[in-house]
Amino acid sequence: MINYDEPLFRPPSEAYSLILQVSLGCAWNKCAFCEMYSGKQFRIRPEETVFEEIDSMSRHSDQIKKVFLADGNAMVLPFDKLTKILDKLNTTFPKLNRISAYALPRNIEAKSDEELRSLANKGLKLLYVGIESGDDELLERINKGETYKSTSIALQRARKAGIKLSVMIINGLGGQHYSQQHALNSAKVVNEIQPEFLSTLVLSYPLGEDHFKQKFNGEFLPLNTIELIAEMKIFIETLELENTVFRSDHASNYLILKGNLCRDKDKLLNRINAVLDDPINARLRPEWMRGL
Ligand code: SF4
C-alpha cells in the first residue's frame, strides 16, 4: 500500500500513472508564484520505504505502464539513487513503458551526458520542466534560481540524451512592466530547446495577489484579460518550432488554444487576433470577461 504524503501534485497527463513519492516537497521551494510545497520540508525518502511501496503494487504489475516520480523535483536525486529506483521499477513492472518526473534545469545540469543517457535507457522518458520565463530579469524577480542560459543548455542536453520534455511558461508572470520581454525571451528559449510538449498557464495567486506582490522582487502590475492574450500573441508569433504539441487549456487560461507548432501556428494566431479585434463577441471563458 502507498501512503501518500499530501499535498500531492502531478501533471494532468499523468492521470493514469502510478505516482511514487521518491522525495517530498521541493528542494528549491523559493519561486515567488508557487505555494505547492510551501508547507512541506524537502527530503529524499528512504530507499527501503520507496521499494516497499513498489513491492506493494506488484500485484498490479500487468496494468502499470507509466510511473510518475513525485514530488516537486525528483530529478534532484543523485544518479545512483535514481538508477536503483528505475531498476526496481523495471523489474517489478515488466510492462512499464514510461517513467517521468518534474525537474529543474540544475537537476539535469548536475548529471553527465552519460548519466542522462543511462536514465533514459532505463525508462526515464519524459521530464516536466517549469521554465516559467526565458527573461533573465524576470527570472531573478521571481527567484527561480535559473537563467535563460542555464535552462537552454540543460534542457538541450536532456533532449540529446533521449529524454522528452514537457515545458511550461506562465502567461502574465511579469505583469505589465515585463510583458513584452517575457513573451519574446520565453519564445526564444523554447525555440532553442525545441521541446516535444509546450503549455502555458495564467499566473494565479493561491495566497492572494498581495502575497505574490510581496514575494515578487520589484513592482508588479497585473495584466488584464486582453493584455494577457496580447502577451500570448507575441509569444506565439515569436515561436519557431518544428514539431511541438502546444496546449493552453489549463483551467487558468482565458482562451483555450491547442495545436501543433509549427503546423497550426497561423490558426492559433488567427484565433488570438479574432479575440483581440472583437473581445466582447469572442468566446472567452465567461467567468473571465470581467477583466476586459
Ligand atoms: S521549483 Fe517548482 S515546485 Fe519548486 S518552488 Fe519553484 S515552481 Fe514550485
Image (cartoon, helix red, strand yellow):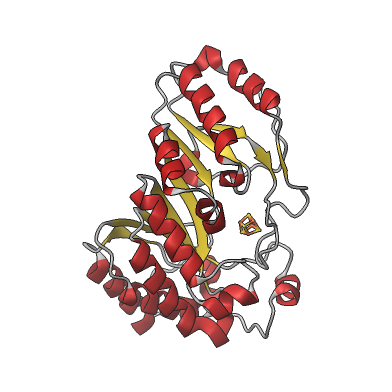
Residue 48, compared with residue 228, is above or below; it is above
Q: Point out residue 189 in the picture as x, y percentages from the top left corner.
A: 41, 69
Quadrant where ligand 1 appears: bottom right
| Left/right of residue 214 with respect to residue 68 in the rendered view | right
Q: Observer-nearest residue: 136 or 20?
A: 136
Q: Point out residue 172 in the picture as x, y percentages from the top left corner.
A: 53, 75
Q: Quadrant of residue 63?
A: top left
Q: Observer-nearest residue: 239 or 112?
A: 112
Residue in the picture at 52% in, 37% down: 68
Q: Residue furthest left?
A: 263
Viewer can see residue 277: yes
| Left/right of residue 35 with respect to residue 166 in the rendered view | right
Q: Point out residue 205 in the picture as x, y percentages from the top left corner.
A: 67, 66
Viewer can see residue 198: no
| Left/right of residue 48 with respect to residue 175 in the rendered view | right
Residue in the picture at 43% in, 16% down: 62
Residue in the picture at 71% in, 27% down: 3
Q: Point out residue 72 in the picture as x, y percentages from the top left corner.
A: 62, 48
